[in-house]
Amino acid sequence: MSSNTAAEWVGWSSQPITVKPGASYLLSGWLKSRGLKGDATIYAHFHDAAGALCKSGAMVNTSPSVSGDSEWVNSTGFLTAPPDASAIEVHLTMNTSGTLRHDGILLCEVVEGVIRNVHGAAGQVLPAGQALHVWEVNPLRKVFPDTPPQAPARRVAVELARNEYEPFQLALRAPSSPRAVESKDLSNALAASPSPPRG
């Protein structure tokens, strides 16, 4: 839009999109501006079944807005459809001068998710009646209190040269908090059981 033109609403509007009263929606898109004299963002209007603007909360928009010379900015908004809403129209418009570009416009309903079951990579759960579950974990991976137990570790194999150090990690899970966990130094056992030479 030319900088010499009087400011007025110009742009593109979508066809009415059906919505559910009281439902939540995500409106998102990318904006880029060049020489924009004012602010611009993504706008939307909620309409009732007769096509009129809803009595309250009809005009909504995303944030942040862009102005001046701006690179691509992701502008988003979580919208709640008013009680009398029947449809929504998305407006890629502005009432200022300059160049405004839009890309990746998204409008979708946001629904509440419910976690039913959590499964680990090995699909293991703590066996009933087992006092302690032990499994091996990559030493570079962090274990959290809610990390599901994996296949039990029967042994741990570590290969290294003399005077080198190589870590390994064991994770422990119990049905209830244990009163104590005891570990023993394996240095003597390793010294007494060297690996057989290869080749």
Image (cartoon, rainbow, N blue to C red):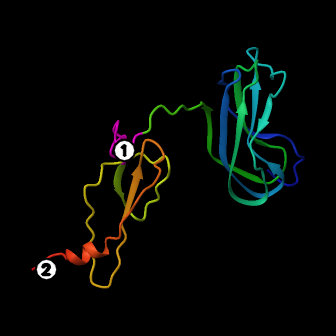
Q: Main secondary structure of the magenta part?
A: loop
| Residue type, label 1 | Ala
Q: How far apart in space, not on screen, are marks 2 and 1 (Cα)?
A: 38 Å
Viewer-nearest residue: 78 or 166:
166
- Residue at image position (66%, 21%) is 20
Compared to 85, does 145 lie above or below?
Answer: below
**Part of the protein shown in magenta:** 119-132
- Residue at image position (45%, 54%) is 180
Task: Tell me if 197 is positioned left or right of 143 in this view.
Answer: left
Q: On the image, numbered disc 1 is attached to which residue? A: 131
Q: Please give the count of numbered marks on the rendered protein.
A: 2
The mark nearer the N terminus, 2 or 1, is 1
**Label 2: few (<14), some or many (≥20) within 10 Å?**
few
Instruction: Find numbered disc 1 in the image and state the secondary structure of the residue it sits on.
Output: loop
Q: On the image, numbered disc 2 is attached to which residue? A: 197
Compared to 188, does 100 lie above or below?
Answer: above
